[in-house]
Image: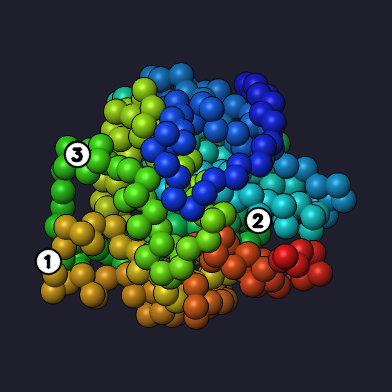
């Protein structure tokens, strides 16, 4: 069953370094943080729990008959796809952007066996409830790992698979990153702060650069860790890190049968558990210029697009260049990409 919850879009003007008094707190399902389009809920039962999966369903003014499904990354939400949703809708796509269970505006179960198969199954059920069959799937970061798993489970449904700086193009355990318990991840997540998020994103997502418009995404995440639900937010985040570390997809890239557009920011250095790895190993992890080429060679029908000066989030760092590459790769009119001010 679907329940539509209208949430008004608001403009958020946040200074690059907000004062302590201005720091917002949000609920465990991001209550208090507004998305740019109305949010709907897909309600279902999974592993004995009644869960709500939040999602955006943005319909184009001039449909081209195609649907794009956008899968967010670990430190992202459906709302962080805002620019991409706008571009795809203007190009005629119906766009579905869910928040996965454990993330953002979706339920945070206290006891859930997170797996990429389970998240793919949840997403498949959501799309079935909307009557969506054939689709273009676009996954970023951890959403890229999920998109790969979805493509392996439901290959007949995907017309085009787009992977944007997907993590999981290497097996961190095999490269020497040690296993850490969920309890260790939980303690790390409990220390999450806006400053820590900002420093990590500046280095990894934006290749050492920073713009004021990035700040709202920092506060989106940090606000959940300031709120009354911070413990369950940190706990689910720890469970998700364990899922990412223990469920590699790199060995199955050769089994993807659909056309794959692989979009890589060459200055990306993301690697799960890098901070736990021995210093001698850390420089060998997250080498995206190499990982992207290796992945493209393994995937049977891959097209590789590289952004030499961009980091882990090219769709946010340079939306004009990213969306030009995306629409070109999908065969959509590049003229649909709006010019940046």
Indicate the quadrant containing the N terminus: top left, top right, bottom left or bottom right.
top right
x, y percent for residue 239: 29, 39
* Residue 120 visible in image: no
Circle 1 residues within 10 Å: few <14, some 14–19, many ≥20: few
Q: Is residue 304 left or right of residue 39?
A: left
* Image quadrant assignment for residue 110: top left
In the image, taking residue 15 as reference, residue 3 lies left or right, namely right
Q: Is residue 46 visible?
A: yes
Residue at coordinates 49% horizontally, 78% vertically from top-left? 309
Q: Quadrant of the C terminus?
A: bottom right
Q: What element does badge 2 sit on?
A: helix
Comes first in the chain, label 3 or label 1: 3
Q: SS of the residue at dot 1? A: loop
Q: Which residue is mark 1?
A: 278
Percent of width and height locating residue 4: 68, 24
Separation of disc 3 and disc 1 at Cα? 20 Å
| 79 versus 156 height, above or below | above
In this rendering, the answer to whether 213 lies above or below 312 is above
Q: CA distance from mark 2 to mark 3?
A: 34 Å
- Residue topped by disc 3: 187
Residue at 16% across, 57% down: 276
- The answer to whether the residues at label 3 and label 1 have Cβ atoms under 8 Å apart is no
Horizontal and vertical percent for residue 278?
Answer: 12, 66
What residue does disc 2 label? 84
């Amino acid at each position: 069953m679907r329940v539509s919850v209208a949430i008004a879009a608001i403009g958020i003007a946040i200074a690059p370094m907000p004062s302590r008094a201005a720091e917002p707190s949000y609920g465990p399902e991001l209550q208090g943080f507004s998305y740019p389009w109305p949010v709907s809920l897909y309600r279902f039962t999974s592993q004995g729990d009644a869960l709500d999966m939040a999602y955006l369903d943005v319909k184009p003014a001039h449909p081209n008959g195609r649907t794009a499904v956008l899968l967010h990354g670990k430190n992202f939400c459906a709302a962080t796809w805002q620019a991409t949703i706008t571009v795809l809708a203007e190009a005629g796509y119906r766009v579905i952007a869910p928040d996965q269970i454990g993330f953002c505006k979706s339920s945070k179960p206290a006891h859930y066996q997170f797996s990429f198969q389970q998240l793919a199954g949840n997403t498949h059920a959501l799309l079935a409830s909307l009557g969506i069959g054939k689709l273009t799937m676009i996954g970023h970061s951890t959403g890229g790992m999920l998109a790969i798993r979805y493509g392996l489970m439901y290959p007949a449904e995907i017309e085009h698979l787009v992977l944007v700086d997907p993590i999981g193009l290497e097996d961190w355990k095999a490269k020497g990153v040690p296993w850490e318990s969920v309890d260790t991840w939980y303690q790390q997540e409990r220390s999450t702060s806006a400053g820590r998020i900002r420093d990590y994103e500046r280095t990894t997502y934006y290749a050492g650069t920073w713009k004021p418009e990035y700040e709202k995404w920092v506060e989106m995440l940090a606000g959940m860790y300031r709120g009354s639900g911070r413990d369950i937010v940190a706990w689910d985040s720890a469970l998700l890190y364990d899922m990412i570390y223990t469920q590699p997809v790199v060995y199955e890239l050769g089994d993807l049968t659909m056309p794959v557009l692989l979009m890589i920011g060459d200055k990306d250095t993301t690697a799960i558990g890098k901070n736990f790895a021995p210093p001698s190993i850390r420089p060998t992890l997250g080498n995206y210029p190499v990982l992207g080429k290796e992945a493209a060679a393994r995937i049977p029908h891959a097209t590789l697009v590289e952004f030499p000066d961009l980091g882990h989030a090219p769709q946010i760092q340079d939306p004009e260049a990213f969306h030009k590459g995306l629409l070109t790769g999908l065969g959509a009119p590049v003229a649909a990409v709006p010019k940046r001010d």
